Image (cartoon, rainbow, N blue to C red):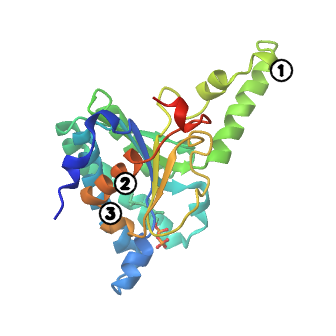
């Protein structure tokens, strides 16, 4: 097997990778298994990709674990996903601490079921001092929710006479997004062959490189992460300029 890891330029590793973990259901169906077993297998990929990313020096990994639209799934699947989250966070805290992984979350987490919220908050609190990599779980998240939320906060400040509309800059707006303090993702990966953003980090991925792979999430591991990073490193990021301006 080609050694993909050795081909990665350590000075050009993305600081922040965002992933739409898609295809758990189809992975399970292909094997004649219930959908929920696909989600269970997806947890193994979360573990593998987090560790592989940390080893390469990735500082933030943001995973789309549950969107605001996912509440529309069959109730049994929603319940199973919420239980899986509780089980996984509880079961992983010790390893997260051993491996320097700080857990955090973005999204309207206060609206999660109480048991999920409680475990999530415990996980965040117990790993808050870890510094090797930050694992950001997007839970009850959607980019349109987040952008509206930020807009309302700023509008309230304008109404109270604390802010002039002309003082609303990109920086000020970003301070009210759930990702404030994090660099924007340089690379966004979506598994399972779909090529959509599905309401994920729409503001933050304005200049991200997009990488779509047909691999289902439970089959996405460290080698697949290396391939995605190599693809990213082979692209020219121009940010609106022309090739000749980039030295
Ligand atoms: C998408 O596959 C996957 C999800 C909506 C859930 C992802 C959740 C996990 C991998 C487990 C979460 C655990 C942690 C700790 C992050 P899909 O069900 O949409 O697949 P399909 O498109 O093939 O139906």
Task: Please state the horizontal and vertical placement of residue 35, each as a whole percent of the image.
Answer: 41, 76
| Marks 2/1: CA–CA distance | 45 Å
> Looking at this view, is 235 or 177 the one in front?
235
Q: Is residue 52 left or right of residue 204?
A: left
Among numbered discs 3 and 2, the one appearing first in the sequence = 3
Foreground: disc 2 or disc 1: 2
Quarter of the image where one finds residue 126: top left
Distance in Å between CA atoms under marks 3 and 1: 48 Å
In this view, the mark in front (3 or 1): 3
> Measuring 24% from the left and 51% from the top, which residue is drawn there?
91
Crowding near pointer 3: few (<14 within 10 Å), some, many (20+)? Answer: many
Q: How many marks?
A: 3
In this view, 75 is above or below 120: below
| Mark carried by residue 220 | 3
Residue 133 image position (x, y, % from top left)? 30, 36
Instruction: Work out which residue is located at the far front of the displayed protein and give it.
Output: 244
Residue 99, by quadrant, is top left
Q: Quadrant of the N terminus?
A: bottom left
For label 1, being within 8 Å of ligand 1 is answered no
Which of pointers 2 and 1 lies earlier in the amino acid sequence?
1
Disc nearer the start of the sequence (3/1): 1
Circle 2 residue: 228
Which residue: 38% across, 35% down? 15
Q: Which residue is mark 1?
A: 159
Vertical relation: 89 (above or below) 133: below
Label 3 residue SS? loop
């Amino acid at each position: 097997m080609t050694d993909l890891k050795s081909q990665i330029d350590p000075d050009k590793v993305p600081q922040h990778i965002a992933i739409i973990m898609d295809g758990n259901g189809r992975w399970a169906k292909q094997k004649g298994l219930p959908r929920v077993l696909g989600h269970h297998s997806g947890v193994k990929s979360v573990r593998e990709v987090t560790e592989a990313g940390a080893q390469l020096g990735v500082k933030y990994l943001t995973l789309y674990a549950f969107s605001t639209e996912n509440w529309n799934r069959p109730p049994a699947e929603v319940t199973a996903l919420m239980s899986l989250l509780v089980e996984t966070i509880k079961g992983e805290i010790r390893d997260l601490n051993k491996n320097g992984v700080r857990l955090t979350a973005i999204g309207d987490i206060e609206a999660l079921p109480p048991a999920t919220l409680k475990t999530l908050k415990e996980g965040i609190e117990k790993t808050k001092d870890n510094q090797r990599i930050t694992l950001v779980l997007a839970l009850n998240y959607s980019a349109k929710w987040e952008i509206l939320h930020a807009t309302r906060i700023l509008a309230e400040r304008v109404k109270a006479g604390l802010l002039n509309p002309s003082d609303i800059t990109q920086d000020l707006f970003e301070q009210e997004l759930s990702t404030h303090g994090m660099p924007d993702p340089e690379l966004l990966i979506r598994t399972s062959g779909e090529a959509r953003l599905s309401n994920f980090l729409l503001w933050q991925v304005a200049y991200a490189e997009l990488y779509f792979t047909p691999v289902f999430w439970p089959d996405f591991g460290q080698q697949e992460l290396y391939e995605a990073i190599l693809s990213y490193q082979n692209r020219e990021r121009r940010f609106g300029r022309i090739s000749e301006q980039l030295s």
